[in-house]
Image (tube, rainbow, N blue to C red):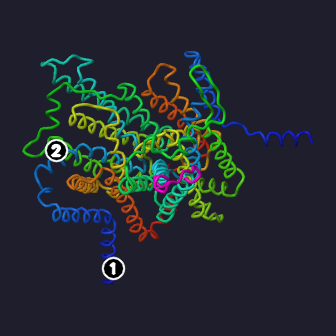
Amino acid sequence: MENVQLKSRIDILLKYSKKDVGLSVLGIATIMVTFILSITLGKSFFSINNFQSMMFQISEFGFLALGMSIAMLTGGIDLSIVSNAGLSGVLAAFVMSGKIIPITDSNQMFIIILAIVVAITNSILCGLVNGVLIAKISVPPIIATLGTMILFNGIGMALTNGESVGLLVDDYWKFGTSTIGVIPYIFIIMVITMILINIFLSKHKLGKQIYLIGENKIASLFSGQNTERIIIRIYMIIGFLSGIASLIMISRVNSARMGFGDTYQLQAILVAVLAGYDPNGGKGKVLGVVLGITLLQFLQSAFTILNFTPYSKKLIWGSMLLIVMIINYFLNKERKPRKVAVKEVSKK
Amino acid sequence: MDSTKQGNIKMNKRKLTDMEKYLLIIMIGYIILVSFVNPMFLSFETLFDMFRSGSGTMILALGVMIVIISGGIDVSFTSIAIIGAYCAINLMLKFNINNIYFAFLVSGSIGIFLGSINAIIIYFFKLPTLIVTLGTSSVFYGFMTTFIGTKSIPLAQMPSSLVDFGSKNILTLSSEHGNYGLSVFIIIIVILLFITWFIMQKTMLGRKIIAIGNNEEFAKRIGVNILQTKLFIYCYMGLLSGIMGIIYFSDLKIVNPVTLVGSELMIIAAVVIGGVKLTGGHGTILGTVLGVLLIQLFKSTLVFLGLSTSWNDLFIGCILIFSVCIISYKEKLRNQKELRFSNQ
């Protein structure tokens, strides 16, 4: 009797450790990389300057990675986040360039707020387009967002002819580059967003519904949820995150151009997969995204310090993506027999 | 007797699919519009120019079509094309081999090899093809640029056979601007079109590819060798990429290994515009050809409308979204009518 109880307890324990095995692997990898970097690079890596520049870069990219991971949570993918951010950035830059409304000292604050509103509205609208295509018209997410990616890019290119739009508002640029102590403002914004999204996904009703939809869309439909409306909302949230990313991007370089941040596309997918998000949906945690971004940023800074070519970064990121996927495959394989039976029933 | 004969005729004559009809209508409408605005557009010169610049896209699109019909997606083909061609041309320069067939052979072999790596990873680890090929694309490309080089080869140093091949015409016409002609690339395209058509329509292999695209599990249970079929699919894609790489460089007349990569999504878009369903199992060669032609038409004719090439993406994006909406919405209505639910 006691034996049985003990056995079931051990089972539960094993189940929990296995449930988060991807996350633990990632955590161990992050610690190991940090350890190796501290030995090999020492002070040149662990300097305040280096950490500050890493924080700037992380906050620019973090929102996009977060958006991509939420898309993967639903079993979809969003290829349009970067072009959405590009288009929103260009629109905001137009407002702040003084071409539409002349800038005076007195209306600077108003123009900044207007630009932020324009960028966020546009990005949410772009997300809405994605959501409607995916939910209402049943276009597979990858192809819907491929289409909108080209479309948003096209609108931005047609507006700017591929040239960059400079900003004339000083305060905005100052906000993007200034810090509290050593910590940049934008980094604080990103940390707060991460925490909010984490609470939203784990506590809020809509957040839980996202996991359900990712796990099994038909089941969640039959359990009486309005899956179409939920998916549209999710893609609007993803669009919103792209909008914030765009605002941060233009504040960092003080101008906007289409095609800026194109390399983030692969990186965002990489971080989401690295973070333990299953491309088929239903699995993943915000903590994983945080770890994934940290790991990637540490490696990237190390590459820069070591003077590697940008191409070797590509090689290492690509290999990391494949290796993580393969490790996850082997980890999942162990507990597959139990899962297959459940899945088969739910699919029929 | 009469009715059976009629039936036979009907069977032989394939009806156009809806998508093909829409594409033809859009194309004809667009051509009429452009020639109205600018009569210069209607000439053999424009046509031949389009064939020349579209030939690379066409070749890749054939491979992408097969991959998508099999239910997968490949984004590594542009890096494979560049690697194959760049390595082949470097070898030619190193060993002083000046033979265009050698270039195709080496480039094609490298393509087949890299394609088989894709297939093996996809098959053995049962991973989503998009993510695998995203990964392998950066690995292949990163490997080449790190260990082989990124130096571009100018026209003066390029093997002469390659340059000759790029400027060879099978038909030359002259106008007041000078000579122009139908490039020799068209022969390769016709051959590849025929081979692809033959594989998809006349062989068991083609049936197997479609079966896998419709339902891999069912295909396995009726005895399709999944590994073999996938190896073929991705190796064929690799082979086509290798061929395309050589054509691309010989057309450009400069070997620059940092171009082309990044344009893979546009080619996938061309295939999807042609009505090949991304969920697999459906797609026609005619549709793919029309899709590529349509994109090529936009690429090369915006100038005639007085628009800069920056408008290119806008048009293509609109048409892409329009075409996938039609396909997907029709399917949704059908699924609703038959009470089918899918996890897509």
Amino acid at the residue labelled 2 = Ile
Which residue is rendered at x = 15% and y = 51% of the image? A51
Which residue is rendered at x = 57% and y = 37% of the image? B167
Q: Residues within 10 Å of mark 2 (few under 14, many from 20)?
A: some
For the residue pair B293 and A347, the one nearer the viewer reads as B293
Q: Which residues are magenta?
A: B90-102
Query: For residue B108, what is the image quadrant?
Result: bottom right
Amino acid at the residue labelled 1 = Lys
Q: Which residue position is annotated with label 1?
A: A7
Question: Quadrant of the image for the N terminus of chain B?
Answer: top right
Q: Which residue position is annotated with label 2?
A: A188
Image coords of residue B224 (percent x, y) = 63, 63
Give the chain of mark 2: A
Q: Earlier in the sequence, mark 2 or mark 1?
A: 1
Residue A146 at least partly seen = yes
Image coords of residue B177 (percent x, y) = 56, 21
Which residue is rendered at x = 49% and y = 32% of the image? B316
Which residue is rendered at x = 52% and y = 55% of the image? B111
Q: Is residue A220 magenta?
A: no
